Structure formats: structure tokens, C-alpha cells
């Protein structure tokens, strides 16, 4: 019913709830039925109408390798508050996901991807193609990114004359 008191409840009623629900949700020894319930809860939280719930969930699960891929993708496509932790840290996202997410992404999202641990050469190459100096600098500062000779050559050809990039390449 539109206009009811329930419709007027603001998102702050969730304040802290996502942290309580998302932290510690994966104890060892869970049975398959319990794990299915946990995955269902993650799906529900990832689709919560309150951004603060989705952002808190993303922060809690960003480093976990057992998160359902569709939950990670849902959050990666969300507003920055929820997307950035997932884009920057989720081991669940695969290269094909990241390559698709790079297209048309904002600078904060590109920077999050460029800073990922163990970034592949394919994703690094796609990030260089975006021609954002800040993204290239983040890539060069990412000691775990696979910047093969082709990627480095592409960086030099695209932006090698820029002093900040020259300094990063020298390091």
C-alpha cells in the first residue's frame, strides 16, 4: 500500500545490521543445507534496497573466495560504495568479468581494478587501453600485477612522454 508508514521507513534502520549478518557467516563444518541458506542470505543482502547494507556486505565479503559469483557481480555493478571493495579485492571475479566491467567504468572503479592483487596481463592491458594516467600509475605501482613486455610497451607508446609515468617506469 503506497504512502503507508512502512513505505516511510528510511534505510538507516539497517545501520549495522549488514555487518552483524555478514561477519562470521562461514564457519567451518557447515552442512550443504546450511551453506545453501548462507548463499541465499548473501543473495538477499546483495539485493537489499539500502545501499548501506550492500556496501557493508561488500566490505565483509570482498576477500572471500567462497562468495557466489553472481553475488560478487551484482555488487561489482552496484554504486561505488558497494562496488569498489569487490572490484578491488574479490577473488571470485574472473578476468572475463573484469574485462567486461572495465568498459565504460568510472575512474574510481578503474583504479580499484588496477590495484587488485595478482592482476592478469589481459586485464592490465585492457586498463592501459582506457588511457587514464591515474590508472596507469596505479598499475605501475601494483607490484603483483602481471605487466608483461607487451603491456609495458603499450604504456610507453601511449603515455611514456609523461613525467609521472616515466618515474613510475623507472621504479
Image (spheres, rainbow, N blue to C red):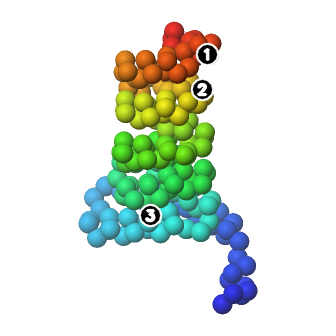
Disc 1, SS: loop
Q: Is the C-beta separation of discs 3 and 1 under 8 Å? A: no
The CA distance from mark 3 to mark 1 is: 44 Å
- Residues 119 and 54: in front is 119
The CA distance from mark 3 to mark 2 is: 36 Å
Q: Residue at x 69, y 87 (%)?
A: 2
Above or below, comparing residue 104 to residue 151 in the picture: below
Does residue 108 appear left or right of residue 35 in this picture? right
Above or below, comparing residue 102 to residue 164 in the picture: below
* Upstream in sequence: badge 3 or badge 1: 3
Q: Residue at x 51, y 54 (%)?
A: 77
Q: In the rendered image, which residue does mark 3 sit on? A: 42
Residue 96's disc is: none
Q: Position of residue 72 (x, y in %)?
A: 44, 54
Q: In the rendered image, which residue does mark 2 sit on? A: 133
- Residues 82 and 30: in front is 82
Q: Position of residue 121 (x, y in %)?
A: 37, 29
- Label total for image: 3
Q: In the rendered image, which residue does mark 1 sit on? A: 162
Amino acid at each position: 500500500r503506497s504512502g503507508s508508514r512502512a513505505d516511510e521507513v528510511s534505510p538507516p534502520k539497517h545501520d549495522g545490521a549488514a555487518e552483524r549478518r555478514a561477519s562470521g557467516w562461514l564457519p567451518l563444518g557447515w552442512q550443504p543445507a546450511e551453506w545453501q541458506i548462507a548463499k541465499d542470505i548473501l543473495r538477499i543482502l546483495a539485493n537489499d534496497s539500502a545501499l548501506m547494507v550492500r556496501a557493508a556486505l561488500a566490505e565483509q565479503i570482498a576477500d572471500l573466495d567462497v562468495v557466489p559469483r553472481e553475488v560478487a557481480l551484482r555488487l561489482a555493478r552496484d554504486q561505488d560504495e558497494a562496488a569498489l571493495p569487490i572490484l578491488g579485492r574479490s577473488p571470485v571475479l574472473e578476468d572475463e568479468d573484469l574485462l567486461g566491467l572495465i568498459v565504460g567504468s568510472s575512474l574510481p572503479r578503474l583504479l580499484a581494478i588496477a590495484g587488485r592483487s595478482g592482476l592478469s596481463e589481459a586485464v592490465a592491458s585492457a586498463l592501459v587501453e582506457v588511457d587514464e594516467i591515474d590508472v596507469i600509475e596505479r598499475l605501475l605501482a601494483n607490484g603483483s600485477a602481471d605487466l608483461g613486455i607487451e603491456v609495458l610497451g603499450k604504456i610507453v607508446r601511449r603515455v611514456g612522454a609523461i613525467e609521472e609515468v616515466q618515474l613510475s617506469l623507472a621504479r
